[in-house]
Amino acid sequence: MVPFAGWEMPVQYTSILAEHQAVRERAGIFDVSHMGEIDVKGENAEEFLDSVTCNLVRELKDGQIQYNAVLNETGGIVDDITIYRLSKQHFFVVSNASNYEAVTAHFLKYRKPGVDIENISNSIHQIAIQGPLAEEILSKQLNIALSDIDYFHFKDFTLNGTQMRISRTGYTGEDGFEIYSDVSSGVALWNNLLQTGKERGLIPCGLGARDLLRLEARYALYGHELNENWNPVESGIGWIVKEKQTAFPSYSKTLEQKKNGAPRMVIGFKLSESGVPREGYPVVDAGGNELGKVLSGGFSPIVGAGIGTAMLPAGIESFYIQIRDKKIPATGQKKAFVQGTAGKNRPK
Protein backbone atom coordinates (compact mmCIF):
# COMPACT_ATOMS: atom_id res chain seq x y z
CA MET A 1 0.00 0.00 0.00
CA VAL A 2 1.26 3.49 -0.86
CA PRO A 3 -0.10 7.03 -0.49
CA PHE A 4 -1.62 8.26 -3.75
CA ALA A 5 -3.31 11.65 -4.15
CA GLY A 6 -4.59 11.58 -0.57
CA TRP A 7 -5.63 7.91 -0.74
CA GLU A 8 -3.99 4.68 0.34
CA MET A 9 -3.69 2.54 -2.79
CA PRO A 10 -2.42 -0.99 -3.45
CA VAL A 11 0.65 -1.26 -5.68
CA GLN A 12 0.02 -4.99 -5.99
CA TYR A 13 -2.04 -7.79 -4.46
CA THR A 14 0.11 -10.70 -5.68
CA SER A 15 2.65 -9.52 -8.25
CA ILE A 16 2.60 -6.85 -10.95
CA LEU A 17 3.37 -9.37 -13.70
CA ALA A 18 0.69 -11.85 -12.55
CA GLU A 19 -1.93 -9.09 -12.44
CA HIS A 20 -0.79 -7.73 -15.81
CA GLN A 21 -1.09 -11.22 -17.33
CA ALA A 22 -4.57 -11.70 -15.86
CA VAL A 23 -5.88 -8.54 -17.53
CA ARG A 24 -4.31 -9.35 -20.90
CA GLU A 25 -5.48 -12.98 -20.94
CA ARG A 26 -8.55 -13.17 -18.66
CA ALA A 27 -9.75 -10.33 -16.42
CA GLY A 28 -8.66 -8.13 -13.56
CA ILE A 29 -10.60 -5.89 -11.20
CA PHE A 30 -9.42 -2.47 -10.00
CA ASP A 31 -10.76 -0.29 -7.18
CA VAL A 32 -10.65 3.17 -8.75
CA SER A 33 -12.79 4.99 -6.20
CA HIS A 34 -10.06 7.61 -5.90
CA MET A 35 -11.21 9.11 -9.20
CA GLY A 36 -13.29 12.29 -9.05
CA GLU A 37 -16.81 12.85 -10.35
CA ILE A 38 -18.46 16.21 -11.09
CA ASP A 39 -22.08 16.82 -12.10
CA VAL A 40 -22.68 19.62 -14.59
CA LYS A 41 -26.34 20.49 -15.13
CA GLY A 42 -28.51 23.26 -16.49
CA GLU A 43 -29.90 24.73 -19.69
CA ASN A 44 -26.45 26.01 -20.72
CA ALA A 45 -24.45 22.95 -19.58
CA GLU A 46 -23.39 21.83 -23.07
CA GLU A 47 -22.29 25.30 -24.16
CA PHE A 48 -20.41 25.78 -20.90
CA LEU A 49 -18.42 22.54 -21.18
CA ASP A 50 -17.55 23.40 -24.78
CA SER A 51 -16.10 26.70 -23.53
CA VAL A 52 -13.74 25.12 -20.96
CA THR A 53 -12.53 22.01 -22.83
CA CYS A 54 -10.66 21.47 -26.09
CA ASN A 55 -12.76 18.70 -27.66
CA LEU A 56 -16.22 19.18 -29.17
CA VAL A 57 -18.72 18.46 -26.42
CA ARG A 58 -21.62 19.47 -28.67
CA GLU A 59 -20.92 16.41 -30.85
CA LEU A 60 -21.80 14.04 -28.00
CA LYS A 61 -25.07 12.13 -28.07
CA ASP A 62 -27.02 10.84 -25.06
CA GLY A 63 -25.32 7.77 -23.63
CA GLN A 64 -21.97 8.61 -25.23
CA ILE A 65 -18.63 9.38 -23.55
CA GLN A 66 -15.83 11.64 -24.75
CA TYR A 67 -12.15 11.88 -23.86
CA ASN A 68 -11.34 15.56 -23.34
CA ALA A 69 -9.09 17.97 -21.44
CA VAL A 70 -9.52 21.12 -19.37
CA LEU A 71 -6.91 23.75 -20.27
CA ASN A 72 -5.62 26.72 -18.32
CA GLU A 73 -4.96 30.21 -19.66
CA THR A 74 -1.50 29.30 -21.01
CA GLY A 75 -2.62 26.07 -22.69
CA GLY A 76 -1.39 23.76 -19.95
CA ILE A 77 -3.60 20.85 -18.92
CA VAL A 78 -5.59 21.25 -15.71
CA ASP A 79 -6.65 17.63 -16.19
CA ASP A 80 -7.63 15.10 -18.80
CA ILE A 81 -11.21 14.01 -18.27
CA THR A 82 -14.01 11.89 -19.65
CA ILE A 83 -17.43 13.45 -20.19
CA TYR A 84 -20.62 11.38 -20.03
CA ARG A 85 -23.68 12.92 -21.68
CA LEU A 86 -26.96 12.07 -19.97
CA SER A 87 -28.75 14.84 -21.89
CA LYS A 88 -27.99 18.25 -23.37
CA GLN A 89 -28.66 19.67 -19.90
CA HIS A 90 -26.84 17.06 -17.82
CA PHE A 91 -23.24 15.81 -17.98
CA PHE A 92 -21.17 13.59 -15.69
CA VAL A 93 -17.46 14.47 -15.68
CA VAL A 94 -14.80 12.02 -14.44
CA SER A 95 -11.48 13.52 -13.35
CA ASN A 96 -8.22 12.25 -11.87
CA ALA A 97 -7.86 11.88 -8.11
CA SER A 98 -5.19 14.55 -7.81
CA ASN A 99 -7.10 17.07 -9.91
CA TYR A 100 -10.85 16.91 -9.37
CA GLU A 101 -10.77 19.79 -6.91
CA ALA A 102 -8.75 21.86 -9.40
CA VAL A 103 -11.19 20.98 -12.18
CA THR A 104 -14.16 21.92 -9.98
CA ALA A 105 -12.49 25.25 -9.14
CA HIS A 106 -11.76 25.90 -12.82
CA PHE A 107 -15.37 25.14 -13.75
CA LEU A 108 -16.66 27.47 -11.04
CA LYS A 109 -14.30 30.22 -12.21
CA TYR A 110 -15.75 30.15 -15.73
CA ARG A 111 -19.30 29.15 -14.80
CA LYS A 112 -22.08 30.87 -16.74
CA PRO A 113 -25.71 31.55 -15.77
CA GLY A 114 -27.87 28.48 -16.25
CA VAL A 115 -25.15 26.04 -15.14
CA ASP A 116 -24.95 24.13 -11.84
CA ILE A 117 -21.69 22.44 -10.85
CA GLU A 118 -21.39 19.90 -8.04
CA ASN A 119 -18.38 17.86 -6.96
CA ILE A 120 -19.95 14.49 -6.00
CA SER A 121 -16.69 12.53 -5.68
CA ASN A 122 -17.12 11.55 -2.02
CA SER A 123 -20.42 9.80 -2.70
CA ILE A 124 -19.32 7.73 -5.70
CA HIS A 125 -17.64 4.32 -5.69
CA GLN A 126 -15.93 3.19 -8.91
CA ILE A 127 -14.79 -0.25 -9.99
CA ALA A 128 -13.04 -1.17 -13.25
CA ILE A 129 -13.18 -4.73 -14.55
CA GLN A 130 -10.85 -5.19 -17.51
CA GLY A 131 -9.85 -7.99 -19.84
CA PRO A 132 -11.20 -10.29 -22.57
CA LEU A 133 -13.54 -12.04 -20.07
CA ALA A 134 -14.77 -8.85 -18.37
CA GLU A 135 -18.13 -8.78 -20.14
CA GLU A 136 -18.85 -12.43 -19.40
CA ILE A 137 -18.06 -12.09 -15.69
CA LEU A 138 -19.84 -8.77 -15.08
CA SER A 139 -22.90 -9.83 -17.08
CA LYS A 140 -23.15 -13.05 -15.07
CA GLN A 141 -22.85 -11.24 -11.74
CA LEU A 142 -25.46 -8.57 -12.54
CA ASN A 143 -27.65 -10.86 -14.65
CA ILE A 144 -27.97 -8.27 -17.41
CA ALA A 145 -26.85 -8.14 -21.05
CA LEU A 146 -23.96 -5.76 -21.67
CA SER A 147 -23.15 -6.54 -25.32
CA ASP A 148 -25.22 -3.58 -26.53
CA ILE A 149 -23.02 -1.06 -24.67
CA ASP A 150 -20.56 0.12 -27.32
CA TYR A 151 -17.04 1.36 -26.68
CA PHE A 152 -17.11 4.79 -25.00
CA HIS A 153 -20.83 4.51 -24.28
CA PHE A 154 -22.71 3.90 -21.03
CA LYS A 155 -26.08 2.92 -19.58
CA ASP A 156 -27.75 3.55 -16.24
CA PHE A 157 -29.34 0.60 -14.46
CA THR A 158 -31.40 0.09 -11.32
CA LEU A 159 -30.53 -3.33 -9.89
CA ASN A 160 -32.20 -4.52 -6.70
CA GLY A 161 -32.94 -0.92 -5.82
CA THR A 162 -29.35 0.20 -6.46
CA GLN A 163 -28.52 2.71 -9.16
CA MET A 164 -25.44 1.89 -11.25
CA ARG A 165 -23.82 3.60 -14.20
CA ILE A 166 -21.90 1.16 -16.39
CA SER A 167 -19.57 2.35 -19.15
CA ARG A 168 -17.51 0.43 -21.67
CA THR A 169 -14.29 2.24 -20.85
CA GLY A 170 -11.01 1.62 -19.07
CA TYR A 171 -7.35 2.45 -18.72
CA THR A 172 -5.67 -0.80 -19.73
CA GLY A 173 -6.10 -1.14 -23.49
CA GLU A 174 -8.32 -4.18 -22.97
CA ASP A 175 -12.08 -4.44 -23.27
CA GLY A 176 -13.91 -3.83 -20.02
CA PHE A 177 -16.24 -1.72 -17.96
CA GLU A 178 -16.25 0.94 -15.27
CA ILE A 179 -19.09 0.78 -12.75
CA TYR A 180 -20.24 3.76 -10.67
CA SER A 181 -22.48 3.34 -7.64
CA ASP A 182 -22.88 4.39 -4.02
CA VAL A 183 -20.09 3.26 -1.71
CA SER A 184 -21.78 0.34 0.09
CA SER A 185 -23.10 -1.09 -3.19
CA GLY A 186 -19.66 -0.75 -4.75
CA VAL A 187 -17.97 -2.65 -1.92
CA ALA A 188 -20.55 -5.43 -2.17
CA LEU A 189 -20.11 -5.61 -5.95
CA TRP A 190 -16.32 -5.86 -5.56
CA ASN A 191 -16.64 -8.86 -3.23
CA ASN A 192 -19.31 -10.54 -5.35
CA LEU A 193 -17.36 -10.11 -8.58
CA LEU A 194 -14.28 -11.73 -7.06
CA GLN A 195 -16.39 -14.76 -6.13
CA THR A 196 -18.24 -14.93 -9.45
CA GLY A 197 -15.11 -14.49 -11.53
CA LYS A 198 -12.81 -16.74 -9.53
CA GLU A 199 -13.30 -19.78 -11.73
CA ARG A 200 -12.57 -17.66 -14.82
CA GLY A 201 -9.31 -16.34 -13.38
CA LEU A 202 -10.46 -12.88 -12.23
CA ILE A 203 -8.07 -11.36 -9.67
CA PRO A 204 -7.72 -7.95 -7.97
CA CYS A 205 -5.07 -5.68 -9.48
CA GLY A 206 -3.11 -2.70 -8.18
CA LEU A 207 -1.39 0.45 -9.39
CA GLY A 208 1.69 -1.38 -10.67
CA ALA A 209 -0.20 -3.49 -13.20
CA ARG A 210 -2.43 -0.56 -14.12
CA ASP A 211 0.59 1.60 -14.92
CA LEU A 212 2.26 -1.04 -17.08
CA LEU A 213 -0.97 -1.79 -18.94
CA ARG A 214 -1.69 1.87 -19.68
CA LEU A 215 1.91 2.43 -20.81
CA GLU A 216 1.70 -0.49 -23.25
CA ALA A 217 -1.51 1.06 -24.60
CA ARG A 218 0.22 4.49 -24.78
CA TYR A 219 -2.40 6.13 -22.52
CA ALA A 220 -1.14 9.36 -21.01
CA LEU A 221 -0.91 9.79 -17.22
CA TYR A 222 -1.23 13.13 -15.48
CA GLY A 223 2.02 14.07 -13.77
CA HIS A 224 3.99 12.12 -16.38
CA GLU A 225 2.95 12.83 -19.99
CA LEU A 226 0.47 15.53 -18.94
CA ASN A 227 0.90 18.56 -16.69
CA GLU A 228 -0.14 22.19 -16.24
CA ASN A 229 2.77 23.48 -18.36
CA TRP A 230 2.43 21.36 -21.51
CA ASN A 231 -0.49 21.76 -23.92
CA PRO A 232 -2.28 18.78 -25.50
CA VAL A 233 -0.28 18.99 -28.75
CA GLU A 234 3.05 18.82 -26.91
CA SER A 235 1.69 16.09 -24.65
CA GLY A 236 0.78 13.79 -27.53
CA ILE A 237 -3.00 14.08 -27.24
CA GLY A 238 -3.40 16.86 -29.82
CA TRP A 239 -6.05 14.82 -31.65
CA ILE A 240 -8.61 16.02 -29.07
CA VAL A 241 -7.98 19.70 -29.93
CA LYS A 242 -10.78 20.84 -32.25
CA GLU A 243 -11.82 24.02 -33.99
CA LYS A 244 -14.96 25.30 -32.33
CA GLN A 245 -17.26 28.29 -32.13
CA THR A 246 -16.94 28.56 -28.35
CA ALA A 247 -13.27 29.22 -27.67
CA PHE A 248 -11.61 27.66 -24.62
CA PRO A 249 -8.74 29.36 -22.71
CA SER A 250 -5.57 29.50 -24.88
CA TYR A 251 -7.63 28.46 -27.93
CA SER A 252 -5.61 30.35 -30.58
CA LYS A 253 -2.19 29.24 -29.31
CA THR A 254 -3.17 25.59 -28.96
CA LEU A 255 -4.86 25.41 -32.36
CA GLU A 256 -1.88 27.11 -34.02
CA GLN A 257 0.45 24.43 -32.64
CA LYS A 258 -1.85 21.69 -33.86
CA LYS A 259 -1.77 23.14 -37.37
CA ASN A 260 1.93 24.02 -37.55
CA GLY A 261 3.54 21.64 -35.07
CA ALA A 262 5.00 22.03 -31.60
CA PRO A 263 8.70 22.61 -30.89
CA ARG A 264 8.70 19.56 -28.61
CA MET A 265 6.56 16.46 -28.31
CA VAL A 266 5.96 13.48 -26.03
CA ILE A 267 6.93 10.36 -27.96
CA GLY A 268 6.97 6.65 -27.22
CA PHE A 269 10.14 4.59 -27.53
CA LYS A 270 11.36 0.99 -27.38
CA LEU A 271 14.84 -0.05 -26.35
CA SER A 272 16.87 -1.89 -29.01
CA GLU A 273 18.95 -3.69 -26.38
CA SER A 274 18.25 -5.14 -22.94
CA GLY A 275 17.51 -2.64 -20.19
CA VAL A 276 14.65 -1.15 -18.22
CA PRO A 277 14.04 2.59 -18.64
CA ARG A 278 12.80 4.28 -15.48
CA GLU A 279 11.17 7.64 -14.88
CA GLY A 280 13.82 10.37 -14.74
CA TYR A 281 16.51 8.53 -16.70
CA PRO A 282 18.28 10.92 -19.14
CA VAL A 283 17.55 10.75 -22.87
CA VAL A 284 20.74 11.63 -24.73
CA ASP A 285 22.17 11.94 -28.23
CA ALA A 286 25.16 10.03 -29.60
CA GLY A 287 27.51 12.52 -27.96
CA GLY A 288 25.93 12.10 -24.54
CA ASN A 289 24.17 15.50 -24.61
CA GLU A 290 20.88 15.41 -22.72
CA LEU A 291 17.76 15.84 -24.85
CA GLY A 292 15.17 15.16 -22.17
CA LYS A 293 14.17 12.63 -19.52
CA VAL A 294 12.08 9.48 -19.41
CA LEU A 295 8.52 10.33 -18.34
CA SER A 296 7.20 6.77 -17.96
CA GLY A 297 9.07 3.53 -18.44
CA GLY A 298 9.21 -0.16 -17.70
CA PHE A 299 9.71 -3.63 -19.16
CA SER A 300 6.86 -5.03 -21.24
CA PRO A 301 6.65 -8.84 -21.10
CA ILE A 302 4.53 -8.79 -24.27
CA VAL A 303 6.84 -6.55 -26.31
CA GLY A 304 9.83 -8.30 -24.74
CA ALA A 305 11.72 -5.03 -24.34
CA GLY A 306 11.98 -1.90 -22.30
CA ILE A 307 9.42 0.74 -23.35
CA GLY A 308 8.70 4.29 -22.29
CA THR A 309 7.84 7.86 -23.14
CA ALA A 310 9.89 11.06 -23.24
CA MET A 311 9.44 14.73 -24.11
CA LEU A 312 11.92 15.48 -26.90
CA PRO A 313 12.60 18.35 -29.34
CA ALA A 314 10.70 17.98 -32.60
CA GLY A 315 12.56 16.14 -35.36
CA ILE A 316 14.73 13.95 -33.13
CA GLU A 317 14.95 10.50 -34.72
CA SER A 318 17.98 8.88 -33.10
CA PHE A 319 18.53 8.86 -29.35
CA TYR A 320 19.65 6.78 -26.39
CA ILE A 321 18.47 6.13 -22.85
CA GLN A 322 21.21 6.56 -20.26
CA ILE A 323 20.91 3.64 -17.85
CA ARG A 324 23.63 4.01 -15.25
CA ASP A 325 26.93 4.10 -17.20
CA LYS A 326 25.51 2.69 -20.45
CA LYS A 327 23.75 4.35 -23.39
CA ILE A 328 20.98 2.07 -24.73
CA PRO A 329 19.79 2.85 -28.27
CA ALA A 330 16.05 3.48 -28.59
CA THR A 331 13.62 3.80 -31.46
CA GLY A 332 10.60 6.08 -31.45
CA GLN A 333 7.11 4.64 -31.75
CA LYS A 334 3.91 6.58 -32.41
CA LYS A 335 1.32 3.83 -31.94
CA ALA A 336 0.45 1.69 -28.95
CA PHE A 337 3.09 -0.85 -27.95
CA VAL A 338 0.38 -3.46 -27.40
CA GLN A 339 -2.96 -3.63 -29.22
CA GLY A 340 -5.50 -4.97 -26.74
CA THR A 341 -9.20 -5.75 -27.13
CA ALA A 342 -10.53 -2.28 -26.22
CA GLY A 343 -12.86 -0.98 -28.90
CA LYS A 344 -12.26 -3.98 -31.15
CA ASN A 345 -15.05 -4.19 -33.73
CA ARG A 346 -16.88 -1.42 -31.89
CA PRO A 347 -17.45 2.22 -32.85
CA LYS A 348 -15.54 4.84 -30.88
Image: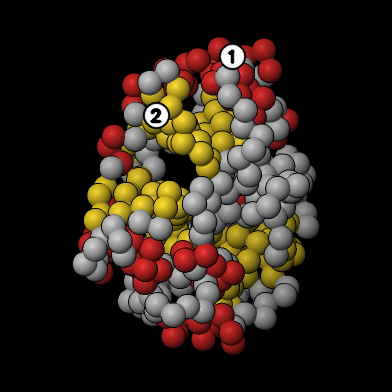
Residue 206 visible in the shown view: no
Q: Is residue 346 left or right of residue 283?
A: right
Residues at marks 2 and 1, CA–CA distance in whole angstroms: 20 Å
Q: Residue at x 34, y 27 (%)?
A: 183
Of residues 137 and 99, the one nearer the viewer is 137
Which element carries disc 2, helix, strand or loop? strand
Kindly identify which numbered label has been placed on residue 163. 2
Marks 2 and 1: which is nearer the front?
2
Q: Position of residue 108 (x, y in %)?
A: 23, 62
Residue depicted at 56% across the width and 12% down the height = 195
Q: Which mark is residue 205?
A: none
Mark 1 Cα-neighbour bin, 10 Å: few <14, some 14–19, many ≥20: some
Upstream in sequence: badge 2 or badge 1: 2
Residue type indicated by callout 1: Thr
In the image, is residue 307 above or below residue 133? Answer: below
> How many marks do you count on the picture?
2
Q: Is residue 57 above or below residue 122?
A: below
Q: Amino acid at mark 2?
A: Gln
Which residue appears at 72% of the width and 75% of the height?
317
Residue bearing the label numbered 1: 196
Expressed as whole percent of the image width and height from the top left, the position of residue 14 reads 56, 22
Residue 161 screen position, x and y as percent: 38, 21
Q: Tell me where residue 211 sits by quadrant.
A: top right
Residue 97 vertical placement versus 283 (above, below): above
Residue 204 seen in the figure: yes
- Please rate how many residues cluster around mark 2, counting C-alpha atoms within 10 Å: few if below 14, some from 14 to 19, many from 20: some
* Quadrant of the rendering where the N terminus is positioned: top left
Labels 2 and 1 touching (C-beta < 8 A): no
Residue at left offset 61%, top offset 32%: 146
Q: How is the image coloured?
A: secondary structure
* Frontmost residue, 73 versus 230: 73
